[in-house]
Image (spheres, rainbow, N blue to C red):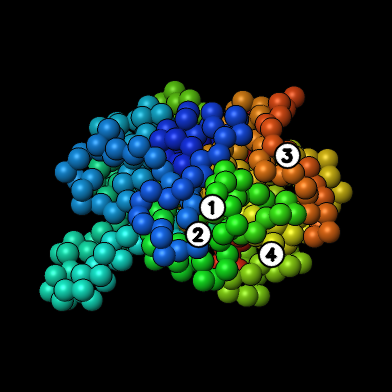
Amino acid sequence: MKRRVVVTGLGCVSPLGNTVEETWNGIKQGKSGISNISLFDTSKLNVKIAGEVKNFDPGMWIDKKEARKMARFCQFGAVAAVQAMADANLSKESLDSTRTSIVLGNGIGGLEIIEAGIKKMIEVEPSRIPPLTVPMMIGNECPGNISMILGIKGTSWSLQTACASSTDALGLALDQIRSGRVDMVVAGGTESCITEFGIGAFSVLKTLASQYNEAPEKASRPFDKDRSGFVMGEGAAILILEEYEHAKARGAKIYCEFAGYGGTSDAYHITSPDPNGEGGAYAVKLALEDAGLHAEDIQYYNAHGTSTHANDSAESAMLKKALGDHVYKMKISSTKSMTGHCLGAAGALEALISIKALEENVYPPTINLDNPDLEQGCDLDYVPNKAQKADNLNCVASGSLGFGGHNGVVIFKKCE
């Protein structure tokens, strides 16, 4: 028998708000967190919009002096972890430090730190590169900092599988608890790549939406015929995962059970998903098998749904292949229409949104879905434009498809 794993705490920072409550309220209202970029001068770029985290003050949750030594992605992750711990009614003192670990997904690390260091090297001289550049830029520093803030002495890992990073991190955390190595994992993801270099690099790859600079809130439009690319987002989401009996013994509030995970590789292309959706479909099937469930059990799926032509049609094909005729009876939505694409943090944020949907019996919407792209096979029920009430939501899934062909799928169900 597998050890059962449950979710007992949630924390997040997103373009819709700096707490779970603010983010979830924005999702239910169909609110867009996308606006004109304020973090740097966009005058040289053809993309001028993003899903920025706004009015963020890490000093509200973590020590201000320590926060100054962290890159923005690390600040996001640390704040979300502190929030999740508080939500789980845990503290540094009450935590079993050696039976707890950390697994975070992150795609790129401290991009603004790398950018600033290179500018110093080119414009002045190498000796003027800031001394903390290395410890601030590398992706593993976020779990490292969280381990120090929370006193966690189990493993603190950083997983990098592009846009599937935090979904895969959740899967690895699930396996850690099931194996008996630990009883609790602080798991999720964090990302912050809204810099001149980050936006510029994705722009020349022709992946970002550049046609909606005058109407940012309309730019992310998954499954819509007029989609033109994804919108960069940023933020962090953390889940406290706990072995069921351990959570029960301490009287923890249980959001849901983390039922299953499936991960695969497309072995197809470095940036494009397999148009047939074969690899992603296999990940869905593996997650169902891991959870001991059938396709008919899934009532809602939070799609990767990036608003690119390649992804949205491939993901629709993937779901049809994995779930058969049932796919036409269930609800699917892309909350990236509201948050933008938070890259390595996207999977954890969307898992968190799926858990809140499960808790409150709500189907989150796909906003800006005015004309479904039927010609490209986008003919499913994507919950267009407005959230819908569910009668009795018992089982949800969330999927992520990353550059390099990484596919990850997680399944959550109400805890019996």
User: What residue did someone put label 1 on?
Assistant: 213
Q: Nearer the viewer, mark 3 or mark 2?
A: 2
Frontmost residue, 42 versus 119: 42
| Secondary element at image label 4 | helix
User: What residue did someone put label 2 on?
Assistant: 47
Bin the neighbour count of mark 4 within 10 Å (Cα to Cα): few under 14, some 14-19, many 20 and up: some
User: What residue did someone put label 3 on?
Assistant: 384
Does residue 96 appear in the picture of this structure?
no
Q: CA distance from mark 3 to mark 2?
A: 26 Å
Q: CA distance from mark 3 to mark 1?
A: 23 Å
| Secondary element at image label 3 | loop
Residue 279 lies left or right of residue 7; in this view the side is right
Query: Badges 2 and 1: C-beta atoms under 8 Å apart?
Result: yes
Frontmost residue, 288 versus 80: 80
Q: What quarter of the picture does the N terminus occupy?
A: top right
> Residue 295: x percent and y percent?
77, 46
